[in-house]
């Protein structure tokens, strides 16, 4: 493979999103300047960048840590709940038919409507915000894990049973390894949803965090500052999504499609 081929196959797909963003920003800036759009309606990229610089980095890091702490705790709690629940549902048709409708109801209930009730029940602090982040992120993990384990080839299951393998060995050595690609698909979705859950919780009751900072900025019509927080929040979500990908590639590289192993 030549250097040009390597750049085309490896670097170019990764550069495309960056190039697309760099192409949008000048157009955005030009439209704001030409039409004289005020910052409190739609700030220009330069105004957003200046607003980001006007907030000291220590303050940004304080808000980031408040949001990140809650999101990661909610994500971890979602994993702890979802994986055993998926295993139980795979092993019991009765549990699947009993629990799955409740999971769908929980997922379909608007978390914005439930969040104030959770805050009232659990009080102030990280506990209610962690529960909110968990509630909004656990469903993709449950569905992905259950789907992956149920998709195990029947031939493998029949072979294990013919060899007198126990039910626990069937789960841990056959079904779960086969479900790893599905599990990581659910984890990638869940980590971004955990950030959303943490932000929603901060909208309801918080004194620190990127969600609180966005709400505070908009309430005082500091729209460039709010946009800066939103872009910062998006960057954090992208980093966490990439972190899950790195974990999969590092520890479960065999679960990746051939074209993604590079």
Image (cartoon, rainbow, N blue to C red):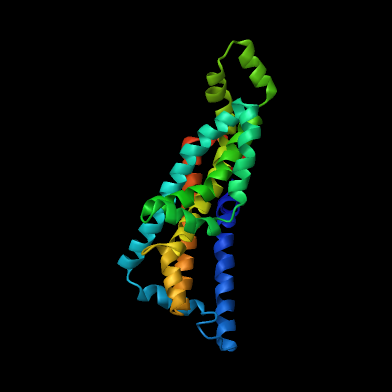
For residue 180, which quarter of the picture?
top right
**Nearest the eye: 120 or 64:** 120
Report the front residue among 8 and 162. Answer: 162
State left or right for residue 73 relative to residue 36: left
Picture residue at 50% right of the left edge, 40% below the top = 248
Q: Give the percent coordinates (x, y) of residue 213.
A: 41, 68
The quarter of the image holding the N terminus is top right
Rendered location of residue 155, percent (x, y): 69, 20
Residues 163 and 26: in front is 163
- Which quadrant: the C terminus? top right
- Camera sees residue 262: no
Q: Is residue 121 left or right of residue 174?
A: left
Image vertical order of residue 6 relative to residue 220, above or below? above
The part of the image, by quadrant, that contains residue 110 is: bottom right
Residue 54: x and y in percent read 36, 76
Could you tell me how many numbered marks the image carries? 0
Residue at image coords 36%, 55%? 125
The residue closer to the viewer here, 35 or 88, is: 88
The residue depicted at 60 percent of the width and 36 percent of the height is 99
Q: Residue extending furthest right?
A: 154
């Amino acid at each position: 493979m030549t250097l040009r081929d390597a750049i085309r196959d490896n670097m170019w797909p990764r550069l495309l999103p960056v190039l697309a963003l760099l192409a949008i920003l000048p157009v955005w800036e030009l439209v704001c300047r030409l039409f004289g759009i005020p910052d409190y309606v739609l700030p220009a990229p330069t105004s957003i960048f200046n607003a980001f610089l006007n907030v000291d980095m220590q303050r940004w890091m304080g808000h980031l840590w408040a949001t990140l702490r809650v999101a990661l705790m909610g994500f971890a709690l979602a994993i702890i709940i979802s994986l055993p629940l998926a295993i139980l549902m795979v092993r019991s048709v009765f549990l699947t038919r009993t629990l799955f409708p409740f999971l769908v109801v929980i997922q379909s209930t608007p978390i914005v409507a439930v969040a104030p009730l959770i805050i009232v029940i659990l009080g102030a602090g990280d506990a209610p915000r962690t529960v909110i982040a968990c509630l909004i992120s656990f469903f993709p993990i449950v569905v992905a894990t259950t789907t992956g384990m149920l998709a195990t080839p029947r031939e493998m299951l029949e072979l294990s049973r013919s060899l007198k393998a126990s039910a626990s060995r069937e789960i841990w050595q056959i079904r779960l390894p086969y479900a790893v690609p599905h599990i990581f698909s659910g984890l990638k979705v869940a980590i971004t949803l955990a950030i959303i859950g943490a932000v929603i919780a901060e909208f309801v009751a918080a004194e620190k965090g990127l969600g609180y900072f966005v709400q505070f900025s908009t309430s005082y019509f500091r729209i460039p500052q709010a946009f800066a927080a939103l872009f910062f929040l998006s960057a954090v979500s992208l980093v966490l999504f990439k972190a899950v990908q790195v974990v999969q590639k590092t520890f479960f590289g065999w679960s990746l499609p051939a074209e993604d192993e590079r």
